[in-house]
């Protein structure tokens, strides 16, 4: 499973002194892109092929407060089916292992010319990846 550590920045904090909701979504996006790039996919190649990832649904669940001055580890686990979408499950942990949040997303690959989801997005990702196992496509 892919995991990246992200520092908690001062501008991620809300008036109550903990990480604001949109920051968790930014951490999730950052981790997914870091995973895609670690799998060997160049975002420019996606553009050249006229496809791009899109989130269709995102659910954020808070489990424990995350406060400033530290870092958070974010995982990515991709789940593939037979349709035009995939799921990504992400967990956010403090350095001591406390689960602070989880994000689940439903995503697809958009054909940028026809503005429609492509069939079998996993095949497109697999064709581009040098390490498809990081995307759950081994």
Image (tube, rainbow, N blue to C red):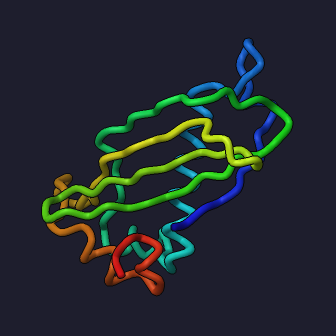
68 or 107: which is nearer to us? 68
- In the displayed orientation, state which residue is furthest to the right: 69
What residue is rendered at 69% in x and 48% in y? 97
98 or 23: which is nearer to us? 98
Look at the picture and state if 20 lies above or below 56: above
39 or 116: which is nearer to us? 39
Look at the picture and state if 123 lies above or below 6: below
- In the displayed orientation, state which residue is furthest to the front: 97
Residue 38 is situated, as x and y percent measured from the top left of the image, at: 56, 74
Look at the picture and state if 92 lies above or below 76: above
Residue 131 is situated, as x and y percent measured from the top left of the image, at: 47, 83
Could you tell whether 58 is left or right of 28 in the image?
left
What residue is rendered at 43% in x and 76% in y? 45
What residue is rendered at 57% in x and 27% in y? 21
Could you tell whether 125 is left or right of 32 in the image?
left
- In the displayed orientation, state which residue is furthest to the top: 15
Residue 49 is situated, as x and y percent measured from the top left of the image, at: 32, 74
Residue 132 is situated, as x and y percent measured from the top left of the image, at: 41, 80
Give the position of the C terminus as an image quadrant: bottom left
Determine which quarter of the picture holds residue 18: top right
Determine which quarter of the picture holds residue 17: top right
Look at the picture and state if 3 lies above or below 65: below
């Amino acid at each position: 499973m892919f995991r990246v550590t992200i520092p908690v920045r001062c501008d991620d904090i809300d008036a109550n002194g903990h990480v604001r909701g949109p920051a968790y979504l930014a951490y999730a996006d950052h981790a997914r892109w870091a995973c895609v790039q670690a799998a060997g996919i160049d975002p420019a190649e996606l553009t050249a092929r006229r496809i791009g990832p899109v989130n269709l649904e995102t659910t954020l669940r808070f489990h424990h407060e995350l406060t400033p001055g530290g870092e958070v580890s974010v995982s990515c686990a991709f789940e593939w089916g037979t349709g035009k979408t995939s799921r990504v499950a992400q967990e956010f942990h403090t350095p001591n292992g406390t689960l602070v949040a989880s994000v689940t997303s439903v995503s697809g690959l958009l054909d940028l010319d026809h503005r429609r989801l492509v069939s079998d997005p996993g095949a497109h990702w697999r064709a581009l990846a040098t390490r498809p196992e990081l995307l759950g496509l081994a």
